[in-house]
Amino acid sequence: MPESDDDLFGAEHVRVYRETAGERGHDWRGARILLLTTKGRKSGEMRTPPLIYRDDGDGWVVVASKGGAPRNPNWYENLKANPTVEIEVKGEHVPARATTAEAEERARLWSLMTEEWPAYDDYQARTEREIPVVTLARQ
């Protein structure tokens, strides 16, 4: 197990986060992390990536950046096919509904998310796609 939470990545990040109820892995490289579980649109299997998030009112916001890759991350395509998801924030498991933000709401949330993780602007500059911003509302 990495000594520093900043060294956590992918499946190991998820494992450590779950084993410690977010005591390790929630605070990562100056940002906060939640776990988002979606149902695979092809496989039907549950998939869980760790994602940078920000609170917004009673919900949460995440960004489908994939580091500025040309295509959206699989988790985003999964939630488009089935917007019923589960999130884990520290030890709390929350059923949620995912929605892609549009127009003015997207602009407002993008600004909030770049405060949390400034590299999102760099990621957007790397790709021609508009990087989706997703709201997660408690169900």
Image: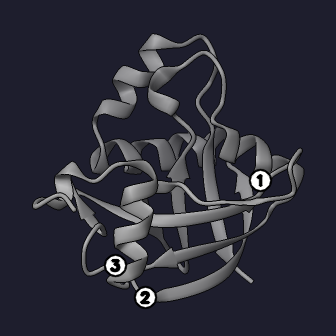
Q: What residue sits 64% from the left and 66% below the top?
A: 136
Residue type at tag 1: Leu
Left or right of 92: which side holds 32?
left
Q: Position of residue 37 (x, y in %)?
A: 65, 65
Labels in figure, total: 3
Q: Position of residue 129 (x, y in %)?
A: 64, 18
* Above or below, comparing residue 139 to residue 122 in the picture: below
Name the quadrant of the C terminus. Answer: bottom right
Q: Are marks 3 and 2 in contact (CB under 8 Å)?
A: yes
Q: What residue sits 29% from the left and 67% below the top?
A: 25
- Distance between the alpha carbons at the discs numbered 3 and 1: 23 Å
Q: Is residue 65 visible?
A: yes
Left or right of 72: which side holds 27?
left
Q: Which sits earlier in the primary sequence, circle 1 or circle 2?
A: 1
Residue type at tag 3: Gly
Q: Label 3 belongs to which residue?
A: 22
Q: Secondary structure at mark 2?
A: loop
Q: Position of residue 36 (x, y in %)?
A: 58, 63
Per the rendering, the mark at residue 91 is 2
Model colouring: one colour
Q: Which sits earlier in the primary sequence, circle 3 or circle 2?
A: 3
- Distance between the alpha carbons at the discs numbered 3 and 2: 6 Å
* Above or below, comparing residue 67 to residue 54 in the picture: above
Q: Position of residue 23 (x, y in %)?
A: 26, 81
Q: Are marks 3 and 1 in contact (CB under 8 Å)?
A: no
Q: Secondary structure at mark 3?
A: loop
Is the residue marked by circle 1 packed among few (<14), some (14-19), or many (20+) residues within 10 Å?
Answer: many
Per the rendering, the mark at residue 79 is 1
Instruction: Locate residue 52: give its quadrant.
Output: bottom left
Name the quadrant of the N terminus. Answer: bottom left
Viewer-side residue, 39 vs 72:
39
Left or right of 78: which side holds 72?
left
